[in-house]
Image (tube, rainbow, N blue to C red):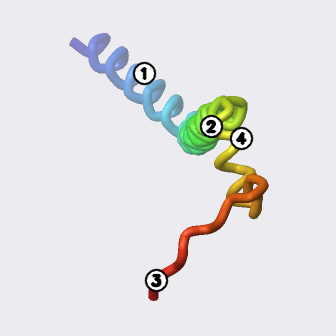
């Protein structure tokens, strides 16, 4: 019975030592996990922005998109009269 107590005490000391020496490791792990989450969020936002820009580029490459862009910049066809604006 005395031998069992010594083994149990040795295991308890080993567990406490492992916990003591790994406190910094767990803090580092939590820090890295937070940084990864932030990085994933930034990457997701960049991918969404890229998809939006590709869609916008695709629209501008079509004749209707080019015309819409030109009209936003003030283009009128020769002889075209703008519609009267009612206030």
Write the residue at 54% across / 76% down: 84
Which numbered disc, 2 or 1, marks the residue that appears first in the sequence?
Answer: 1
**Res 39 visible:** no
Q: Which residue corresponds to mark 3?
A: 86
Front residue of 14/36: it is: 36
Please report contact status of discs 3 and 1: CB closer than 8 Å, yes or no.
Answer: no
Distance from disc 3 to disc 1, alpha carbons, whole Å, reads: 90 Å
Categorize mark 3 by other alpha carbons within 10 Å: few (<14), some (14-19), many (20+).
Answer: few
Write the residue at 68% across / 59% down: 80
Please report contact status of discs 4 and 2: CB closer than 8 Å, yes or no.
Answer: yes
Q: Which residue corresponds to mark 1?
A: 10
Q: Residue furthest bottom?
A: 87
Which numbered disc, 3 or 2, marks the residue that appears first in the sequence?
Answer: 2
Q: Callout 2: helix, strand or loop?
A: helix
Image position of 6 (left or right of 41): left
Write the residue at 72% across / 31% down: 61
Distance from disc 2 to disc 1, alpha carbons, whole Å, reads: 79 Å
Q: Which residue corresponds to mark 2?
A: 64
Distance from disc 4 to disc 2, alpha carbons, whole Å, reads: 6 Å
Which mark is in front, 1 or 4? 4
Please report contact status of discs 2 and 1: CB closer than 8 Å, yes or no.
Answer: no
Which numbered disc, 3 or 1, marks the residue that appears first in the sequence?
Answer: 1
Q: Callout 4: helix, strand or loop?
A: helix
Q: Position of residue 4 (x, y in %)?
A: 27, 12
Q: Which residue corresponds to mark 4?
A: 66
Quarter of the rendering occupied by the C terminus: bottom left
Q: Residue furthest front?
A: 79
Distance from disc 3 to disc 2, alpha carbons, whole Å, reads: 26 Å
């Amino acid at each position: 019975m005395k031998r069992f107590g010594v083994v149990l005490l040795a295991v308890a000391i080993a567990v406490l030592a492992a916990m003591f020496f790994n406190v910094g490791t767990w803090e580092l792990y939590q820090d890295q996990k937070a940084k990864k989450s932030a990085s994933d969020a930034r990457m997701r936002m960049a991918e969404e922005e890229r998809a939006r820009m590709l869609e916008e580029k695709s629209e501008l490459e079509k004749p209707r998109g080019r015309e819409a862009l030109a009209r936003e910049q003030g283009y009128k066809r020769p002889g075209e009269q703008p519609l009267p604006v009612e206030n």
